[in-house]
Image (spheres, rainbow, N blue to C red):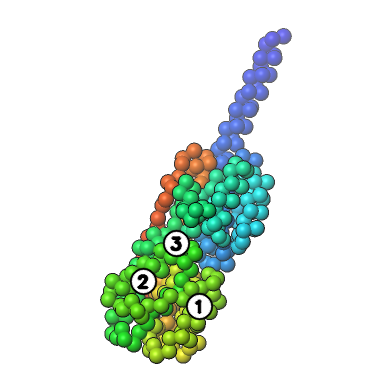
């Protein structure tokens, strides 16, 4: 009587092991829909901005490669962010990558994620605590902001020299958003590089944007241009392509011709239509940093943290390189963006 019972038991154990092995394998080979498949969120503040769409594309590539499920959610404000975390938890996600709509939400996001047992990695915009300091314990990946800003400023200065402009006829409009650290570090870098090139500091003007979209930078630059009459030529820059695009549109509205404006953006993803226009505009260049790489790497880090318990590095930085009408097709093709 014992013998058949032993057979039944060992058969059951064998079957269970087999099922376990199959389920396990399905996580790494990318089979869709299994109950054990790891689910991860990727939350971004401005899903309408190409930068974030390319970040999502990179994250999707990681999901396909490692076989996890990526849940992408746009989180334009605090309420939507906290609701998104609830929904991730309800869906059985193990963690999320986030570019928060407000860095001061950091402590609330961390508390909510912890309560739900979700791991968090920040991308682009770093969480800030109530004391104004970065939440350094939360893994972060983002731009080398000062360095990229300096490259933008150096690009402005080099093109100004190339066009033979006199500093006395020229002023710089730097669209700022100083409440966001990465933005402030970038625009400080732009200003430092302009000064280092010999551009007079009294001809550098900040135009604070209220919102980080084209209308926000357009309004900020318009207000500055209205005050600074007598300037013949403008250097224009900001924390990203959108900031520079809005300011370039403002110079056009104020009667400046394309050849009298040098605009340099940052991102390189949100200026493709602009650089493709048949006639050059005042938007001269951008500093390209790879959004697909940022998306891929943060998603990959999160997956390996969840799956293999590999703790991600706390601070990872990505560099940039200039693109213009001359080389953007080639660079962006190489990046898989075009
Ligand atoms: C911020 C900006 C984005 C992009 C990222 C890059 O989030 O709003 O446009 O520049 O930084 O890190």
Residue 325 image-quadrant placement:
bottom left
Which tag, 3 or 1, sits closer to the chain's start?
3
Q: Is residue 146 shown left or right of residue 60?
A: left
Contact flag, marks 2 and 1 (Cβ < 8 Å)? no
* Residue visible at 38% across and 67% down in the picture: 188
On screen, residue 4 above or below 239: above
Q: Name the residue carrying label 1.
A: 220
Mark 3 surroundings: few (<14), some (14-19) or many (≥20) residues within 10 A: many
Q: CA–CA distance between discs 3 and 2?
A: 14 Å
Q: Position of residue 314 (x, y in %)?
A: 43, 47
On screen, residue 91 above or below 72: above
Mark 2 surroundings: few (<14), some (14-19) or many (≥20) residues within 10 A: many
Q: Assign a secondary structure to mark 3.
A: helix
Q: Where is residue 29 in the image (x, y as percent from the top left)?
A: 54, 43
**Front in this rendered view, residue 203 or 174:** 203
For the question of whether residue 279 can be seen, the reply is no
* Residue visible at 68% across and 19% down in the picture: 8
Residue 182 is tagged as: 3
Q: Name the residue carrying label 2.
A: 191
Contact flag, marks 3 and 1 (Cβ < 8 Å)? no
* Residue visible at 44% across and 72% down in the picture: 238
Q: CA–CA distance between discs 2 and 1?
A: 17 Å
* Residue visible at 57% across and 40% down in the picture: 26
Residue 83 image-quadrant placement:
bottom right
Q: Assign a secondary structure to mark 2.
A: helix
Which tag, 2 or 1, sits closer to the chain's start?
2
């Amino acid at each position: 009587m014992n013998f058949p019972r032993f057979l039944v038991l060992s058969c059951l154990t064998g079957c269970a092991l087999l099922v376990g092995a199959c389920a396990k394998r399905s996580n790494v080979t990318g089979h869709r829909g299994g109950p054990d498949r790891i689910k991860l969120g990727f939350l971004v503040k401005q899903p309408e901005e190409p930068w974030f769409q390319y970040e999502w594309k990179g994250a999707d590539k990681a999901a396909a490669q490692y076989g996890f499920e990526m849940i992408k959610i746009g989180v334009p404000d605090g309420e939507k962010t906290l609701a998104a975390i609830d929904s991730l938890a309800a869906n059985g996600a193990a963690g999320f990558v986030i570019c928060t709509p407000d860095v001061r939400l950091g402590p609330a996001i961390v508390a909510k994620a912890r309560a739900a047992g979700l791991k968090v990695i920040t991308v682009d915009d770093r969480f800030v605590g109530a004391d104004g300091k970065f939440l350094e314990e939360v893994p972060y990946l983002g731009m080398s902001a000062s360095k990229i800003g300096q490259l933008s400023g150096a690009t402005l200065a080099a093109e100004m020299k190339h066009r033979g402009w006199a500093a006395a006829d020229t002023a710089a409009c730097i669209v700022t958003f100083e409440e966001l650290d990465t933005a402030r570090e970038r625009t400080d870098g732009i200003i430092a590089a302009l000064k280092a090139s010999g551009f007079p500091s009294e001809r550098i003007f900040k135009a604070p944007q209220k919102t980080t979209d084209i209308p926000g930078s357009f309004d900020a630059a318009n207000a500055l241009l209205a005050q600074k009459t007598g300037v013949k030529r403008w250097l224009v820059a900001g924390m990203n392509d959108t900031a520079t695009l809005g300011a370039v549109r403002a110079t056009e509205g104020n009667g400046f011709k394309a050849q009298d404006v040098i605009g340099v953006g940052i991102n390189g993803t949100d200026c493709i239509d602009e650089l493709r226009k048949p006639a050059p505009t005042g938007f001269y260049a951008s500093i390209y940093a790879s959004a697909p790489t940022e998306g891929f790497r943060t998603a990959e880090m999160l997956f390996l943290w969840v799956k293999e318990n590999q703790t991600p590095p706390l601070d990872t930085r990505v560099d940039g390189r200039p693109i213009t009408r001359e080389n953007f097709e080639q660079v962006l093709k190489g990046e898989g963006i075009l």
